[in-house]
Each structure stands twice: as structure tokens, then as C-alpha cells.
Amino acid sequence: MKRALVWFRRDLRTVDHPALAAAVGQAEQVAPVFVFDPAILKAPDIGPPRVAYLLAALDSLDKNLRELGGRLFIRSGSPAEVLPALAQQIKAEAIFWNDDVEPYALARDAEVQARCQSLGCAVQRFQDQTVHGPDSVLKSDGTPYAVFTPYSRAWLARPLPKPLPRPKTITTPAGLSSDPLPSLAELGFTLRIPMISSGEKAALDTWKTFAAGPASSYASGRNFPALDSTSRLSPHLRFGTISPRWLADRVDRLLAEQPAHRKEIEVFRQELIWRDFYKTILRHFPRVATGCFKPEYDALGWENRDDLFTAWCEGRTGYPIVDAAMRQLNATGWMHNRLRMIVASFLTKDLLVSWQWGERYFMQHLFDGDLAANNGGWQWAASTGTDAQPYFRIFNPASQAEKFDPEGRFIETWVPEATSLRYLPPIVDHATQRTRALALFQAARS
Ligand SMILES: Cc1cc2nc3c(=O)[nH]c(=O)nc-3n(C[C@H](O)[C@H](O)[C@H](O)COP(=O)(O)OP(=O)(O)OC[C@H]3O[C@@H](n4cnc5c(N)ncnc54)[C@H](O)[C@@H]3O)c2cc1C
């Protein structure tokens, strides 16, 4: 074919990009395009960190495409209007993109597809966001798994897909111009925390640092927030500046290279399987985006007190581990996984605030905010999800701190005043709230 469009979305890279590789393989000229969609930029869960990260990743993608002879074309507006118009303008015979799993994206894509096809522009879609697609790890009767352990066993039994190389050259249609990449301020956002590195090269460096060090002790180190022993790849996976299949392939190689550390590295691979699992859940059970996976818990009588929620957001609960974690989030746009579990349990089971309030706050403040993983994590902690923490097992923030921050180093970093007598008194009593949370769950169950 003569001309094609490649629609970039949350796959902002050139290596192992199925849609880009297919378009370059089939068309003489390819126009890579990104569309700023006002519906996403105005959504209630959007926040400055993700938009800033997106802009930096787009800038870096444009540079990487230019190294191959191409470039990125920027547009703004509803994709269902912008893309068919662009396809007509350049007489594209096909548009290529990598599929998403989120309900909004699926509806949007169906509309773009129908409009493009009605204009005679073919649509080619590819599985990309996960190592194994949401329809390839299914039970023997063809239905999706709703429990992680059997899902992970089935995932591991499948051969890993081979990552695709970066295209050698890209030729874009002559005379096509791009809108300028908007600034963060032009999009209406201000980032008040330090920016983190973005783009394919940064992703590769992040992986290399992890593989050369923390990976070999991942299982032992990953639960301790004071140690920097996790990969920090989450924003890269979120925006696709690294490919999950490329990563799984590298993990596989690392396992072969370091047999002595096999058990440690296997636990890291398990986290990538969790990531695939939650995306598969969202794809097959889209109701989780707006309600509990276990529908009986939609009736939970959360108290939703604004004052308690605000204290949680601001790290002023009087529980040092919770406050330290929330301050880490507010100051850096990232929070350690163990702490995400602790603060999510605390918001829901101690403060009796709906998991959906916390879910939205995380999305607004995280660089890696991702609907599937965030929703899965929150529903797990709130005991409303797939294979959730049973509702009667409630994290005790004090014993979590003793176990996972035994010397108080993490707390000391973010709440140095915690050891002084002037530190805030706890806003609720854990034992009392625990009893009340149990009653709430029992009432919903009956
Ligand atoms: C309440 C709650 C909310 C969360 N919200 C998000 C979110 O918005 N975005 C997000 O990417 N992760 C989320 N997680 C999962 C996890 O906390 C982060 O992925 C992790 O802390 C990111 O740091 P890392 O890259 O160093 O992780 P590593 O420990 O190095 O893990 C490697 C990668 O595996 C994936 N991963 C790890 N743990 C999980 C998990 N439990 N579920 C799904 N994927 C996982 C991530 O992509 C991560 O980058 C959440 C967890 C909880 C409990």
C-alpha cells in the first residue's frame, strides 16, 4: 500500500511496536500520529504527573522517529473526527494501532474504526499492552480467569512472544505538517513536584540499573520501602516507553544468566504477570471500572467523611507509616507497593472511606497511574476485588511498620517529627475502626 497512519496512544516507543512494525512493513509511507483528546485531559482522574510524563515521552518518541527518517505528527480533538479527516487528507489506505483494554478507549476505538472504514480506510489492530493478550490466557472452557494463581500458571505455560525489532527506516508523506507539541501550561496543568525521566532510552537505562543490581535480591528486598530495590519501571510500562514483551524476554534471559538468583528474579516476573492479570480482568469485567468486582459490596455503607479523607490525602492521620507514604506520593508522584497496600487498607478499613475515593486520588497524583493496576490494587486492599484480601484480615498499620520499616528509616525520611512527643495523635483508634469495618462488611454480605 502507498500510505498508512499509525495512531500512537500509550505505546510511545519504536522497539517492539506491533502497529508501527506492521505499517512500515506494508506501506511505502507512514504517518505516526498522536491525538490530544480533550475527553481524557478533562477527566476527573487526570493529574499533572501523568500529563507531564506523557509530554516528555512524546518529545522523546518524536526524536526517536526522526532518527529513523520519520517524525511524530501532533493533532488535537476528538480522535473519531481527527483521524478519519487525517486519513482522507493523506489518502491513507489503512490506519494501524495497538489495542487498549480500558472501557473509554474501547468505545472510542470502535467509533474511530467505524468512521475510518466507512471512508474506505482499513483498520488493523494489534495486541500490545500485555505480554500475553487478554484473550490468550483463558480457562479450558474459554472463559477468563478471575483468580490470580491459576491465571499465572496458565500464563507461565505459554511460550513468550518474540519482541519485534525497531523499524530500520520510516518515510513520512511529503508536505504533511504537525501541530506543535503543547506545553504543560497550555494543557492547563502545573507540575509542582520534580519531573522523572521519560522515553525509551530512560526506560532502557532503568532496566539496566535494575538488572545489574536489585533484580538479584528482588524477592527479599521488594517489601522494604526504605530500600530502593524495585525496578521503578511502572511509568515506562504505563506509557509504553518499554514493551512488556521485551521486558519479559529480558527477564527470561536474566533467569538463564543468574541461576543462583532464580527464585528472586521469578518473583519479579510474577509482578509482570499481575500486571497482565489486572488488564485481563478489566478487559473481561469492565464493570470493575465503576463498581466492585464482587457486586454485593457495591452496597457497603462507607462513611466517606471528608475530614478523614483530607487528613489521609495530606499525610496527617497520626499513623506515621501512612503519613510517610502519603507524603512520598505527594512529593514524588510514586509510592512503594507495600505502602500502597497499607494506605489503601487504612483508607478503607480504618477510615471507612470508599476505595473509589482513594483510587481517584492515586490516579491524580501518580506518574504511573493506570486504571487496571490501580483498580486491581484498590479492590484487592478493600476486599471487593478478584482474589481479594479477605475482609476480616485488616492490616494493622503499626505492625506493618514494625515489619517492613523495622528501623524506622522510611518514616524518618518523610515524617522526621514522628519520634517527637509533639507528633499528631491518631485521628482514629485502629481497634475500634477494625470492629466497625467488620460490621460494615457483614452487613453488606447479609
Ligand atoms: C492500591 C494500589 C494501587 C496501585 N496503583 C498502581 C498504578 O496506578 N499503576 C501501576 O503501574 N501499578 C500500581 N500498583 C501496583 C504496584 O504498586 C506498582 O506497579 C509498583 O509499586 C511500581 O513500582 P516498580 O515499577 O518499582 O515495581 P516493581 O516491583 O519493580 O514491579 C515491576 C512492574 O510490575 C508491575 N506491577 C508490580 N506490582 C503490580 C501489581 N500489584 N499490580 C499490577 N502490576 C504490578 C508494574 O508494572 C511494575 O512496574 C498499585 C498497587 C496497589 C496496592
Image (tube, grey):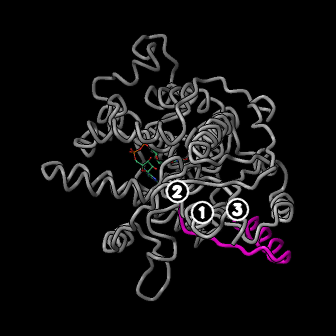
At horizontal 85% and vertical 65% (from top left) the residue drawn is 88
Tell me if the residue at label 3 has its CB under 8 Å from ligand 1: no
Mark 3: few, some, or many residues within 10 Å (few <14, many ≥20)?
some
Mark 2: few, some, or many residues within 10 Å (few <14, many ≥20)?
some
Disc 2 versus disc 1: distance between alpha carbons? 7 Å
Cβ atoms under marks 2 and 3 closer than 8 Å: no
Q: Position of residue 338 (x, y in %)?
A: 40, 41
- The single residue placed furthest to the bottom in the displayed view is 141
Disc 3 versus disc 1: distance between alpha carbons? 24 Å
Question: Which numbered disc, 2 or 3, marks the residue that appears first in the sequence?
Answer: 3
For this rendering, which residue is in front, 295 or 299?
295
Q: Is residue 115 magenta?
A: yes
Q: Position of residue 278 (x, y in %)?
A: 50, 61
Residue 167: numbered disc: 2
Residue 105: numbered disc: 3
For this rendering, which residue is in front, 263 or 350?
263
Cβ atoms under marks 2 and 1 closer than 8 Å: yes
Name the residue type under label 3: Ala
Identify the element where label 2 is drawn.
Answer: loop
At horizontal 49% and vertical 10% (from top left) the residue drawn is 422
> Which residue is disc 1 drawn over?
24
Give, as a single range, the part of the protein colored magenta. Answer: 106-128
Disc 2 versus disc 3: distance between alpha carbons? 26 Å
Name the residue type under label 2: Pro
